[in-house]
Image (cartoon, rainbow, N blue to C red):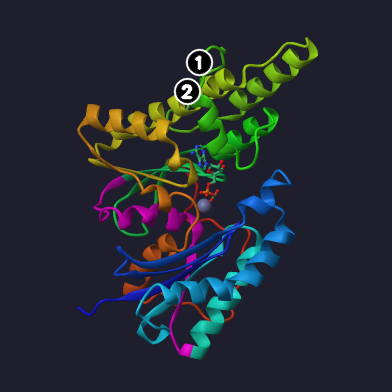
Amino acid sequence: MKDVYILGIETSCDETSISIVKNGETDIATSILTQINTHASFGGVVPEIASRLHSENITLVLEDLLNKTDLTINDIDAIAVTYAPGLLGSLLVGLEFAKTLSLVYKKPLIKVHHIAGHIYANNLEKKLDFPLLALIVSGGHSELVLMKKDYDFEVLGKTLDDAVGEVYDKVAKVLDLPYPGGPNIEKYALKGKNTYSLPKSVLNDELNFSFSGLKSAVINLVHNEKQKKKEINKYNLAASFQEVAIEQLVRKTKIAIMKTNVKRLIIAGGVSANQYLRKEMEKLAKEYNIKLSVPSMKYCTDNATMIAAAAYPLYLKKEFSELNINAKSTDKLFEEKIN
Ligand code: KG4
Ligand code: ZN
């Protein structure tokens, strides 16, 4: 079969990224321009600024990408783009850019869900083999999903309140750590010890997650200590929080492994960059003799490589989009019905 080259575009949050991927598994070239430094001074992503910066930079990112490869747009088989979920103004910049390329160069357009991108980032490491269990951990998601084939998602468990990445960000904020919160909590945790006693989730519900109790406990603890004019040890609190948060992810994943008996586990989403989570998951995989794959660090946070990779199974099924598709700030990749 002829090789398939997909050009992917990702602008859902604060990274402007374009990439070319061969056959859904080989990164030919990737360009990423992050806006982190701009947003960090505001303590979080400012949507209006994000979309303006995408608009300013997207053409330059394409130019940079094309300078990295001998391929030209004529060699591309399809244009893939993140259409949801994310910041609407930001998504629209990428979507309109993708539609224009699709129209002018007569290439099929493929809309990709951002979380599918995070899942298929694993395909850039090692080809996904099914059935597999996916632990999806990002700023908006905490789910355990069974995949029996491409784009087949059976939700085994999900968070009943906050997503784990969101809680990392909130805890970082209450500790006055800079944006982005997750990586900074991880850095602080490395220098601290689990000395604060924080509540483990005691949800009876076997495979669902809950992080709001942990979040509130950290917030209350910080406020109480402040009222008493006592110093918080941020390193120790970061370490204590991280241990409890990750313990829950590991515990639920373990139950899912035992229930499904799958032999392959993947982690997807921004929190998969966390080294402590990766180590704990490695231990679990070893214990149950299952194959674990995690995205390489450069594909954990938002990038277009994963979008082009996720578009490949859709290309094979000829699931192309019309030129009038719209961006969506929220959209489900899978039904969140728990069996
Ligand atoms: O997947 P992602 O880039 O965005 C969404 O699609 O939501 O994930 C972003 C989330 C943020 O909550 C961020 O704090 C978290 O991933 N994150 C981390 C780490 N790197 C990013 N959380 C913990 N440890 C990290 N190293
Ligand atoms: Zn993401």
Q: Nearer the viewer, residue 72 or 114?
A: 72
Identify whether 332 is placed above or below 142: below
Query: Which segment did they paint magenta?
Result: 105-132
Identify the mark nearer the N-term, 2 or 1.
1
User: In this rendering, is residue 117 above or below 6?
Assistant: above
Let me know if residue 317 appears in the view: no
Quarter of the picture holding the C terminus: top left
Q: Residue at x 57, y 16 (%)?
A: 198
Foreground pick, 117 / 71: 71
Q: Is residue 264 left or right of residue 151?
A: left
Look at the image and say whether residue 122 sits in the magenta stretch. yes
Please indicate, yes or no, whether residue 222 appears anywhere in the rendered image: yes
Instruction: Look at mark 2 in the image and give the residue it sits on.
Output: 243
Alpha-carbon neighbours of circle 1 within 10 Å: few (<14), some, or many (≥20)?
A: some
The residue that appears at 52% across and 81% down in the rendered structure is 322
Q: Is residue 107 above or below residue 111?
A: below
Horizontal arrangement in the rendering, residue 247 relative to residue 229 (left or right): left
Q: Where is residue 151 drawn, in percent x and y?
A: 37, 59
What residue type is disc 2 on?
Glu
Closer to us: mark 2 or mark 1? 1
Residue at the extreme front? 67
Secondary structure under tag 2 reads helix
Identify the disc placed on residue 194: 1
**Residue 260 spot, x, y in % from top left:** 28, 37
Q: How many numbered marks have been drawn onto this rendered protein structure?
A: 2
Instruction: Please give the name of the residue rendered at 48% of the width and 25% of the height, measured from the top-left corner.
Output: 190
Mark 2 Cα shell of 10 Å, populated few (<14), some (14-19), many (≥20): some
Q: Are marks 2 and 1 in contact (CB under 8 Å)?
A: yes
The quadrant in which residue 90 appears is bottom right
Task: Give the amino acid type for the residue marked by disc 1 in the picture.
Answer: Asn
Q: Give me the residue at 32% from left, 59% from top.
A: 150
332 inside magenta stretch? no
